[in-house]
Image: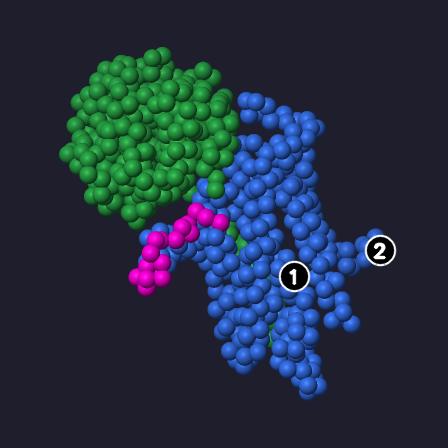
């Protein structure tokens, strides 16, 4: 047949295409450096800092330009999630390439214990004196420059009265309209722990939490894994309420989804964003000046606007559209529940199996 | 010296080297890993124990997952076979000038990534999605159907992803057959159905075997669709292996699951081949 040979080539080309398509778009270009090479007499000093990617990185790259000008610095922003940043610090222990790292999952404690962090100097980071008391790590190696709270996000239009407790999730009026987040997502995991704490369990004992969530499953519209999917559930009116994070509540609201955030009376679960200087940094002074910069009231307001991180400096004032939705103020910060992250991380694997068995249908 | 190596081996050499490095060697590693131990703190310890396999085969949760994977694979292959056969047969019997455009239409989805195609299904299948809205408006159903995050939804989306593979393979066979055979059969008094049953179908058997095996094995190891459409509630082997590897870092268990999946796939495909061989033995002679 005439067609056959042509056809075979066609088939092979298509297969090649489809498989290369499956690889997806993995672009490795996640580092960017802003080298505003102003012609000053001194060469700018180099500083490598991490950020979490996405909206927060965009905001940070924007205000870093101001920092570069003020301190005659050349800042390179590297996208690294907390666990990846810690892994990189371990690998480069003797010759670190990073100066300032940001953590969001409590990794600063591990890093400090392994001798990977430098003690911070209050005389350089003057803003440390203006922070909420709990925002400076007790051993002085780490400062919290922003925080999020795990609480309840709800549909402003369809929920009459803002929820006040985790227990509201089990209410009859939300039956069929509750959104849950899978344990593979940190927020989903924290909610399981929050439910356990509520029922008298702990980071070491989640059985009470699993038991009470079993009763919630029939009311659940969907269990999603990726954080943006939560926004979709609200946008498509599939859910009215979900245990989720304040920063994302703000992001969704910015995107036009009618959601608001409520902190439960039991206390929201705190998620702390910390800034740390890597031990062996070639530019420790500039690194600390950068952290001081992050702690400035006006920069914290920009961080809040960009990534939805609530501020930790007593002098930071948020514009109304931010303070309406984001938890803020010293009292809100102090009421957060500080999970024992060491236990939380160690138990994750065992808990995941229990959770998966619970939700699988 | 070179002359003594037969030419076919020289031609095979690059392929064999790549296969050894990129397939046989990693697979061997996987096999070895599957006998390692996972300590209670989650660390991986080199050993030669059956811990991982015992864990898998003594827990109904995982056995159900394996069964669910095979079930989805079989159903998707069967639906693809029926739909694909219609399509392939139809295209092979149209005028030659329409064939290439029609084949292009079939193959076009392969040029977009499966992620995009599955997002399309999310929009269609969700509770407030197009499908439910239309059916409710037409008064066919009154409550939205639950398709997202269910096995049915995964099957629907997988059929869409796999169908081009089936059509392309079947078309090559149906198009390649000698039309005179069909003509001779009808000349000898067979009606259209009999022509198809006794002549066309047996001749397309190689395509049916190749197509279903291709679709079955890709489906069984397919990750994107179950992960997007099935979410965290429809656990299949492929998604669970990803979970164990990436999220939980339990590589020995993930390896054991991989080995189990591979062996299952081999058993099912050989059973299938055997069944088909005996079925058409008479018709072929």
- On the question of residue A51 being in view, the answer is yes
- Measuring 23% from the left and 23% from the top, which residue is drawn there? A332
Circles 1 and 2 in contact, beta carbons < 8 Å = no
Q: Position of residue B225 (x, y in %)?
A: 48, 50
| Chain letter, disc 1 residue | B
* Sooner in the amino-acid sequence: mark 1 or mark 2: 2
Colour given to chain A in the rendered image = green
Numbered circle sitting on residue B4: 2
The picture quadrant where one finds residue B77 is bottom right
Colour given to chain B in the rendered image = blue
| Residue situated in front as seen by the camera: B7 or B177 | B177
| Residue situated in front as seen by the camera: A39 or A193 | A193
- Measuring 61% from the left and 57% from the top, which residue is drawn there? B214
| Residue situated in front as seen by the camera: A233 or A59 | A233
| Chain letter, disc 2 residue | B
Q: Is residue A183 left or right of residue A137?
A: right
Q: Quadrant of the C terminus of chain B?
A: bottom right
Q: Position of residue B267 (x, y in %)?
A: 69, 49
Magenta segment boundaries in residue numbering:
B135-151
Tell me the residue that label 1 is attached to: B210
């Amino acid at each position: 047949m005439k067609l056959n040979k042509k056809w075979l080539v066609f088939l092979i080309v298509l297969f090649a295409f489809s498989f290369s398509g499956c690889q997806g778009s993995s672009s490795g270009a996640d580092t960017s450096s802003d080298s505003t090479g102003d012609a000053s007499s001194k060469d700018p000093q180099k500083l490598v800092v991490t950020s979490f990617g996405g909206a927060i990185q965009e905001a940070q790259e924007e205000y870093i330009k101001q920092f570069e000008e003020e301190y005659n610095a050349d800042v390179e922003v590297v996208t690294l999630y907390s666990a990846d940043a810690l892994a990189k610090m371990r690998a480069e222990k003797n010759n670190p390439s990073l100066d300032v790292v940001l953590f969001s999952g409590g990794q600063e404690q591990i890093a400090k214990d392994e001798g990977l962090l430098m003690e911070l100097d209050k005389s350089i980071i003057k803003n440390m004196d203006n922070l909420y008391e709990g925002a400076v790590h007790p051993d002085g190696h780490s400062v919290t420059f922003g925080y999020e709270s795990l609480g309840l996000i709800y549909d402003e239009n369809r929920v009459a009265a803002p929820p006040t407790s985790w227990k509201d999730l089990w209410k009859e009026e939300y039956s069929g309209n509750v959104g849950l987040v899978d344990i593979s997502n940190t927020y989903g995991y924290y909610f399981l722990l929050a439910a356990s704490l509520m029922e008298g369990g702990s980071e070491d004992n989640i059985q009470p939490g699993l038991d009470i969530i079993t009763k919630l499953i029939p009311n659940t519209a969907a269990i999603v894994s990726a954080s943006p999917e939560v926004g979709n559930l609200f946008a498509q009116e599939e859910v009215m309420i979900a245990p989720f994070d304040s920063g994302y509540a703000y992001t969704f609201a910015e995107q036009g989804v009618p959601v608001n955030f409520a902190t439960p009376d039991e206390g929201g679960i705190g998620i702390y964003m910390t800034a740390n200087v890597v031990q062996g940094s070639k530019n420790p002074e500039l690194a600390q000046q950068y952290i001081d910069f992050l702690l400035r009231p006006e920069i914290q307001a920009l961080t809040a606007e960009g990534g939805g991180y609530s501020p930790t400096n007593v002098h930071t004032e948020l514009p109304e559209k931010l303070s309406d939705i984001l938890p803020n103020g010293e009292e809100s910060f102090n009421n957060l529940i500080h999970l024992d992250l060491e236990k939380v991380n160690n138990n994750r694997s065992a808990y995941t199996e229990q959770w998966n068995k619970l939700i699988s249908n | 010296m070179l002359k003594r190596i037969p030419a076919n081996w020289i031609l095979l050499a690059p392929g064999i080297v790549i296969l050894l490095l990129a397939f046989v060697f990693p697979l061997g590693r996987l096999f070895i890993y599957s006998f390692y131990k996972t300590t209670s703190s989650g660390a991986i310890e080199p050993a030669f124990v059956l811990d991982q396999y015992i864990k898998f085969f003594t827990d109904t949760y995982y056995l159900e997952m394996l069964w669910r994977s095979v079930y989805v694979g079989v159903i998707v292959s069967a639906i693809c076979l029926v739909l694909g056969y219609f399509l392939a047969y139809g295209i092979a019997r149209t005028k030659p000038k329409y064939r290439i455009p029609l084949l292009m239409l079939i193959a076009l989805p392969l040029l977009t990534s499966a992620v995009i195609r599955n997002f399309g299904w999310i929009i269609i299948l969700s509770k407030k999605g197009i499908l439910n809205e239309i059916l409710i408006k037409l008064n066919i159903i009154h409550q939205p159907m639950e398709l997202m995050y269910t096995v049915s939804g995964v099957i629907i989306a997988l059929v869409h992803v796999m169908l081009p593979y089936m059509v392309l393979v079947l078309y090559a066979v149906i198009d390649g057959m000698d039309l005179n055979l069909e003509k001779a059969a009808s000349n000898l008094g067979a009606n259209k159905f009999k022509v198809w049953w006794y002549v066309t179908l047996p001749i397309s058997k190689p395509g049916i075997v190749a197509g279903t095996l291709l679709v079955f094995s890709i489906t069984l190891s397919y990750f994107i669709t179950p992960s997007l459409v099935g979410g965290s509630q429809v656990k299949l082997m492929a998604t669970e292996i990803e979970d164990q590897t990436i999220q939980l870092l339990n590589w020995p268990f993930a390896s054991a699951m991989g080995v189990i999946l591979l062996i299952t796939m081999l058993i099912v495909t050989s059973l299938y081949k055997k069944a088909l061989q005996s079925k058409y033995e008479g018709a072929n002679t």
